[in-house]
Image (cartoon, rainbow, N blue to C red):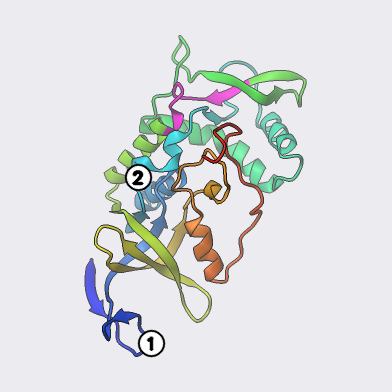
Amino acid sequence: MAETNGTNGSAAPGINGAAYPITDHTYDVIVVGAGGAGLRAVVGCSEAGLRTACITKVFPTRSHTVAAQGGVAASLSNMGEDRWEWHMYDTVKGSDWLGDQDAIEYLVRNAPAAVYELEHWGVPFSRTEDGKIYQRPFGGMTTHFGKGTAQRTCAAADRTGHAMLHTLYGAALKHKAEFFIEFFAIDLIMDEDGRCCGVIALKLDDGTIHRFRAQTTVLATGGYGRAYFSATSAHTCTGDGNAMVLRAGLPLQDMEFVQFHPTGIYGS
């Protein structure tokens, strides 16, 4: 439900002496971003019966997840022996022991369930001849704590992100989530106690300002590879969500760890 209000007060931003009109929206949950993480949050909240809205500056299936190719690592053991402990060892080692090991353990323990969830929702994973999800070897993936080679990566040919994103968007629509497409989140709404109460966004096609109030705000705004001179990140990866967090006086963690593909053209 939305309604348009004029904002009163001498300090209110405006033009020609009149305050900008603000369109108000109220939801249980606001998710900012419609990539893989954002859409999964939208589906989960909607499934739980929460009135959920997703704000995204691009059409959901144009989010950067669509460019992911290689696949998703999970110790399904479809192509040979595998265990989550070996997956964790490889991940900790691959991070040069700088990774958050509690987070890594959560990731590897839950990866098989996440892959099966995507499969049940309709992601067309590549298959073995007997119908199991095919798993390919990938650099750094081992068995027995570095002694053998693991085939751990689940993929939908070389279009894994494309398949995931379209499937998740369909699942979100199935659960009646509401999407505000081509809305650019500007700032978090904070109360006097430092609690986030929603988001202010700009509707890109007409320049109107929208105020989204919610009990819970989820930021899934992706990376900020475009802070670098050369990167393979999409040109939408500009760190808008991180900037909102900083302006709200909230902390950010491990900002130096930015990943993009080590290929590309100088200055691109």
Q: Earlier in the sequence, mark 2 or mark 1?
A: 1
Location of residue 101 (image quadrant) = top right
* Viewer-nearest of discs 2 and 1: 1
Location of residue 209 (image quadrant) = bottom left
Q: Which residue is mark 1?
A: 11
**31 above or below 212?**
above
Q: Is residue 78 visible?
A: yes
**18 above or below 228?**
below
Q: Is residue 212 magenta-colored?
A: no
Q: Which residue is mark 2?
A: 60
What residue is rendered at 35% in x and 51% in y? 46
Label 1 packing within 10 angstroms: few (<14), some (14-19), many (20+): few
Segment tinted magenta in the rendering: 151-161
Label 2 packing within 10 angstroms: few (<14), some (14-19), many (20+): many
What residue is rendered at 53% in x and 79% in y? 193
The numbered dot on residue 198 is none
Query: Residue 120: image x %, image y %?
Result: 39, 31
Query: Residue 180: image x %, image y %?
Result: 30, 55
Q: Give the amino acid type for the residue marked by disc 2 in the picture.
A: Pro
Residue occupying the far front of the picture: 267
SS under mark 1: loop
Q: Nearer the viewer, residue 53 or 230?
A: 230
Image quarter where the N terminus lies is bottom left
Query: Residue 58: image x %, image y %?
Result: 35, 48
Q: Nearer the viewer, residue 177 or 230?
A: 230
What residue is rendered at 68% in x and 47% in y? 102
Q: Give the amino acid type for the residue marked by disc 1 in the picture.
A: Ala
Q: Is residue 156 left or right of residue 75?
A: left
SS under mark 2: helix
3D distance between C-alphas at marks 2 and 1: 36 Å
Q: Is residue 267 left or right of residue 183?
A: right
Answer whether labels 2 and 1 touch (C-beta < 8 Å): no
